[in-house]
Amino acid sequence: MTRRTDPALILVTVALAVSGLVMVYSASGAIAAEQAGDSMKYFNRQLVALGIGLLVALAAAVTPTRTLRRLRGYLYVGVLLALALCFMPGIGRAVNGAHRWVGSGGLNLQPSEFAKVIVPIMAAHTLDRHRRRIGDWRVLLRAGLWMLPAALLILPEPDLGAVVVLGGTVFVAFWVAGARPRHLGALVGAGAALALPLVALEPYRVKRVFAFLDPWKDPAGAGYHTIQSLMAMHSGGLLGQGIGNSKAKLHFLPEPWTDNIGSVLAEELGLVGLVVLVLLYALFAWRGLTIARRARDGFGLYLAAALTGMVVSEAFVNLGVISGMLPNKGLVLPFMSYGASALISHLWLVGILLGIAAEADHARPEEGWPERRDARPVPAA
Amino acid sequence: MKASGLGGRLEELRAWLAPRADAPPIPDHELRPRSTRRLRGLGAFFGLLGLAVVARSAHVMLVPDDRLEHKARVQFEQVREVRGRRGDILDRNHRILATSVDLVDAHVDPSTLDEARRAEVSRILAEHLGTNPRAFARRLADTTRRDVVVARQLTPARWGPLRAALAEAVDGWQGASDRLVYWSSRSAARYYPARHEAVGLLGLVTWNGKGSGGVEEALDHRLRGGVYRYLQWRDRLGRRVSPETPDVRGGDSVVLSLDARIQDIAEEALDDLVERSEPHAAVAVVVDVRTGELLALANRPTANPNDTAQRKPDLLRNRAVTDIFEPGSVFKPFIAAAAVEEGLVTPDSPIDCEGGVWLVGRRRIKDDHPHGVVPFRDVIKYSSNIGAAKTALRLGPDKVIAYLRALGFGRRTGIGLPGERSGFVRDPARIKPIELATTAYGHGVSVTALQLAYAVAALGNGGVRMKPLLVREILDEDGDPIERTEPEAAERVVGEDTARAVVSMMESVTEPGGTGTRARVPGYRVAGKTGTADKYVEGQGYSPTDRVASFIGLAPADDPRLAIVVSADTPTKGSKYGGIVAAPAFARIAGAALPLLGVAPDPALLAEAEEAEPALPEEVTGPPVAIATPDLTWTAEGSLRLPDLRGLTLRDSLAALQGAGLGVTLRGWGVVVDQSPPPGGRLRPGQTVELVLE
C-alpha cells in the first residue's frame, strides 16, 4: 500500500510553528534575560518541544488509523490517570493556584492538552461503530460520555476553557457524523444550561466574562488584560512596530509568550501579520477538512474534522479574546504559544491528520466507504 | 435480573445505551455524502469565524481610539533628554573658571524591599553616606514608589564601595525579586575651581542643567550641550528599557575678557575692604580702558558655588550689575567733562564755592569742606557740591542730561548679563533746578557700578566710550574658536582735550590735600574721585546714618589703562568716607594689576613714594597672588609633555594645565589619581587630558 501525505498541511504547520518560535523569542526575550539571565530560555525550551513534537508527529503519521483505534483505550486511561495526578501532591504542580501540570523539575506536562486529542479519538470511534444509527440520540450520548470523566477532572483544575474546547470538538464530530439537527440543538441548549451555573458560581469567572464587555470600567483590575492587549494591537496598526519592538511584552501583558502571543504578534507585525496568521489557520482548516472528506472511513472523517475544529476554535477563541471580542479564556494560540504540552499535542494532532491522509480514499462519496476488515457487521435490524 | 456490583451496573448502562433498532440503519453511501455536505458547512462556518477575527482586529488596530492612545502614551513613553557636556567658562588666558564634572546619582526601588531589607539597605546607605539610617528608612518607606534618588552627585569613588556593599547585600537575599533594587544614573555637576571668585558674574547651573544668573545664564544657549530627545519606553516596573545612550554634541566653551589674576586681586581687595569696614555689600569692577573689556568683577557678600548649601540668591547676586545706588560725588567728573567740553569752564576758571552754603530756591546746598573762590579743578579735588551744582545749573538741564546719557547712564550698558538694571536719570524737560543741582553731585540719580566703570573708562579713553566686552571668544567642543568679538567704540562723548583735562583734575584728587590720597599707588600716577553718598532707602528717604562709599579711578593717569570702580554699601565700621573705605581697594587693585598688563612702575615715582608716604604700607602691596607655575614643557615638535598631575587637587591640576590650550575632561572629584595620557605623554594644543579624581 502506497502511503500518501499532505505537503500543504506540513508546510502550514511548519510555518505556524516556526513563526511561533520567533514570536516566543521576541515576546519572552527581554523578560527571560531579566529573570533567568538568559534571553533564550523560553525559546530553547520551545525548540526542544518542537523537536519532540515533530518526532511524535512523524510517529503518528506512519501509524495506521487502525492501530490508533486499537490503542485508544490505553491512551484514554493514561490521560485520565495523568489528569488525576495533577491533584496529587508531589507529582502535580500548581501554578497560580491552577492544578494543570504533572511532572517535576525541567519537564512539566499539561495532560488536558492531550485529553483534547484523545477524547475525540474515543468519540470518533464510538460514532463510527454506530454510525448507521446516528439518528438515535443514544449514540450521541455514548460517544459524548467519553468526555465526562475528562471534563470532571479538568474542570476543578480549574480549566473551563479546555472543557469548552473539548465540548466544541466533540460537537463538531457529532455534526459531521450526521447527527440530527434537533439533537444537536438540544445539546447546545444543555451545554449552555450547564455552563451558565459554572460561570455564575465562580465569581472570578463572572468578572472575567463581563470585563471584556467594558474593560474601561476597571482598567487596573478585571479590564487590565483586555486593555493591555487592545493597546498592543492598536499600536501595531496596519504594518506593526517591527519584529522585536513590542512594548506590551515588557511586563504589561501577563506572560506575553503564552496566551497573549497574538497581541505581541499584532503589535510587532500589524494587521498584515495578523491577517497572514488567520490565513495560515484557514489553510490549515482547508487541509484538515479535505483530509476528513477523503478519509477512508467514518472514524477518520469524524476525527479529522473534530481535530481541525479544535485547532480552529482554539485559534478563534484566542484571537477573539485578545481583540476584546470574547471573554478571557486561558487558551493557547495553536502552534504559536509557548508551552511544550500544547505544542507537542498539536503536532501529534497533525501527525494523526497525516495518518488519516495517508489512507485517503478518492472514491466518490456516493459510493460510501470501502469495506474494511475490522469493520463490525452492521447490527441486524 | 439482579445486577451484581459495578460491572453489572455498567452492563445495564451499556444495554440501556445500546442504539435501538427501531429505525432502519443508514447505509454508508448515504452517510458519506451527508458528512461531506456537513464538512462543507463546517468549512463555511470556520470561514465566518476567520472573517469575524479579521474584522474585529482591523477595527481595534486601525480605527483611531483616543483612550487607547492616551493610555499607551502615559504607560509606555517618557520623553527623555540626553544633554551633551556643558562647555567651560575660561578667562582670557584660558584659565578654567567653570567646568563640568561627571558624577553619579544613586537610586533605590523601595517596592522591592520588605521591612528587613529596607533596614539593611538603609544601614548600608547611612554607613556610606554618613547619615542616619532612619532618615533613609523613612525615604524608602513608601513601597508604592519605584524610584527614589537616595544620593545625588556622588563621586565615582564614593559610589563604588556603596554599590559593592549593596550588591553583596542583595545577592545574599533568598528568592530575591526579579527587579533591580538599586542602580545609578549619570549626573553632571558644575565645578568652579576658583570657588567664591566672580560668583555673581559667572552664575550657577541649576540641578536641571540650566544656567542661572551671570554668564551661565546669559550664554546658556552656547554653553549648553546639544540635546538629544527620544521617547524612552518604560516597562511595567517603571524602568527605562531603551538601552541607547546617544552621543550628543557638547556645548561651546566661552572665553571671557576676564583676567583671573586681576579677578583674584579684586577679590582680595574686597576681602580686605570688608574686613576693615564691614559694609552690607561691596563691589569692585575693573575695565580695560582701551578695549572696553571687563577684566574683573567682584561682589560681596559671596559664597562657594560648589557647595549647594551656600547657594542663596542673596549671596550670589551680581550686585555690580543688578543693584543701583545713588553715586554721590563720584558723579562730579562727568559734570565737569560736560562743562569743559561745552567751553563753559577750564580747569583754571575761578568758581565761587560760597563759603560752604548756597541756596537753590529755598533749598540749601552744603560743602563738607568750605571754600571761597577757587579754580574749577579744585571743585573736583575738594569735592565741592556747590561748585558742581553751579556748573550744572549753568549748563542747563538739556546739556547735563544729554552728556550723562552719552556716558551711558540711565540705560543698560549692553554687556548682556541677566538682571542688569538701567538706573535712572531725570527727564530734562521736567527736572527742577534743585534736582539738577543735586544731580551734579550724584543725588537724585541712580547708577550701577558697571555704568560708572564704563563712564569713567570713556574719560580715560580720550572721550570715546567703548562697548562693554565680556565674551572674547567662543570655542567649539574641540576647543577650536568659532566666534570672536573685537573691541568696538560706542560713541565719542567728549573731545580728547576735554577728557585729558578731566583726568588731570581727577589726578589732583589723589594728590596731597585731595579727598583720595589713599588711592595713590607707588610708582604710578593715578586719577580718581571719591564719593560718599547718603543712602537713599526706598520709601524712607535719605538715611541719616547710612552711606554708600565709592571710589572711581583711572590708572595710570598719564595714559590710562584701567578703569576701576569700588563701592561699599553702608560701611559699619570706622570711617564711612569713600576716600577711606574704597580708595585703598582701588590702590591695591591698580598696583597689582598694572604690572600684569606690562605697565612697569616709574622708578622716579617709586622713589618719591617711599620718601613721601611710608605711612600707607599695608594698602600698597605687591602682586598678591602667586600663580602656580605650569610644569609643562614643550618638545621640539611643538607638542606638550605632560607633568605628573597625580596627587594634585583638582584646582592645582587645572592651574598646572593653564594656558597650554589643552582641553581637560574630569571624572570624579578630589585628588587626581589617574591621568590620560600618563606623565610624560605628549599632547598638541587643542587635545584633551583626562583626569580621574577621587
Image (cartoon, helix red, strand yellow):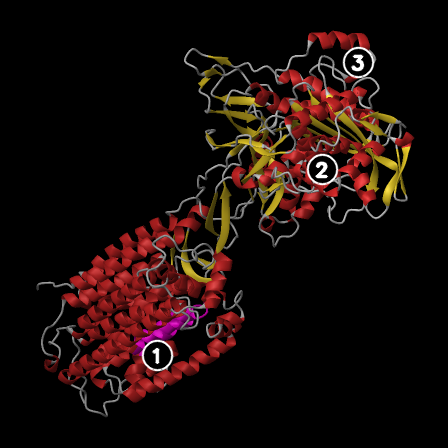
Q: Which residues are magenta?
A: A144-171
> Disc 3: which chain?
B
Q: CA distance from mark 3 to mark 1?
A: 127 Å
Can residue B634 be seen here? The reply is yes
Q: Label 1: chain?
A: B
Q: Which residue does the numbered mark 3 point to in the structure image?
A: B617
Which amino acid type is shown beneath numbered disc 3? Pro
Mark 3 vs 2: CB contact within 8 A: no
Q: Which mark is residue B448?
A: 2
| Residue B336 image label | none
Number of other residues with Cα within 10 Å of mark 1, as a class: few under 14, some 14 to 19, many 20 or more: few
The residue beneath circle 1 is B10
SS for tag 3?
A: helix
Position in image of residue B375 (x %, y %):
81, 24
Distance from label 1 to label 2 (Cα)? Answer: 112 Å
Q: In front: mark 3 or mark 1?
A: 3
**Residue A219 is one of the magenta-drawn residues:** no
Nearer to the camera, B86 or A185 = B86
Q: Residue at x 11, y 76 (%)?
A: A371
Picture layout, residue B169 above or below residue B608: below
**The C terminus of chain B - image quarter:** top right
B670 or B500: nearer the eye?
A: B500
Marks 3 and 2: which is nearer the front? Answer: 2
- Magenta portion: prevailing SS class: helix
